[in-house]
Amino acid sequence: MSARSGPFDPSFDQLPARLPLFPLTGVLLLPRGRLPLNVFEPRYLAMVRHALAHGRMVGMIQPLEGRGDAGDPPLYRTGGMGRIVEFQEMTAEGRFVLTLLGVSRFDVAEEMRREDLFRIAHTDWSRWRADLDGHEPRLDRERLMGAVKPYFHRHGITADIAAIAQAPGERLITSLAMGCPFAPREKQALLETADAAACGELLTALMEMAVRGTVGEGNDTRN
């Protein structure tokens, strides 16, 4: 069953050759996932204005492990592109509140010479063509849900486990991968899996290892 997000999504041929980058440690955007953002830094306010005028596309990408978000840190090669689907200008506070809907992962082919406050990259979509047409993945739901409850307990996460268990497979995998407090390197590994089925397998393994105490806790931040 196709999981295309809607009629406003681009086709593969319409994916942008250039993409403004939003480097943010610990943040993961997968296809068809929803990512709320609170934007207030001048460079990213400018980036959002640019995106609104050029197809509403933003590339979320992590700085390399341990390099932080300040300045222009070196970046991982792969990020996730989202389309701005909700936008609110908080004029009195000088910030934007927006939501990105994940469209596709991308690779940075080359960063462009800086001409604005924010970074822009030439994009390579060749590895991620299948992201645009999602299908319900193979999922060992029993094993995954068997890891969710003790993982949530370990991290003090309160949620309706029964409702989570009823979610369609891709939505379940995407929501857990994006929302759980994995370390940045684990977030990147989840992002770079071949497809949703592989992401689900890795997600389950990371939760099981965390419950056994063999994976360190990470912090998921928002700008």
Image: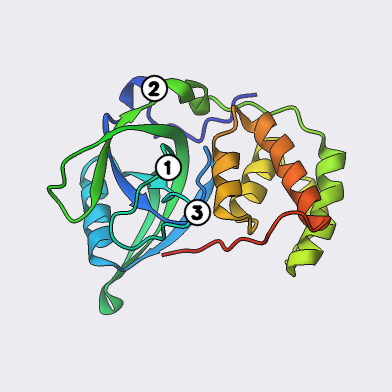
Looking at the image, is mark 3 or mark 2 nearer the viewer? 3
User: Residue 124 vs residue 204: left or right?
Assistant: left
49 or 80, which is in the foreground?
A: 80
**Is residue 161 in view from this perspective?**
no
199 or 100, which is in the foreground?
A: 199
Q: Which residue is mark 1?
A: 76
* Count of numbered circles on the image: 3
Describe the element under mark 1 as helix, strand or loop. Answer: loop
Q: Where's residue 197, x and y in %?
A: 69, 30
Q: Where's residue 143, x and y in %?
A: 86, 41
Instruction: Give the mark nearest the N terminus, 1 or 3.
Output: 3
Q: Counting other residues with Cα less than 10 Å from the Cα at mark 3, is it few (<14), some (14-19), or many (20 or more)?
A: many
Q: Which residue is mark 3?
A: 27
Amino acid under disc 3: Val
Q: Where's residue 22, x and y in %?
A: 35, 51
Determine the image quadrant of residue 157: bottom right
Q: Which residue is mark 2?
A: 12
**Is residue 195 in view from this perspective?**
yes
Describe the element under mark 2 as helix, strand or loop. Answer: helix
Q: Counting other residues with Cα less than 10 Å from the Cα at mark 1, is it few (<14), some (14-19), or many (20 or more)?
A: some
130 lies above or below 107:
above
195 lies above or below 159:
above
Q: Quadrant of the N terminus?
A: top right
**For the point 63% across and 26% down, which residue is it?**
135
User: Residue 29 vs residue 45: left or right?
Assistant: right
CA gap between label 3 and label 2 equals 24 Å
Q: Counting other residues with Cα less than 10 Å from the Cα at mark 2, is it few (<14), some (14-19), or many (20 or more)?
A: some
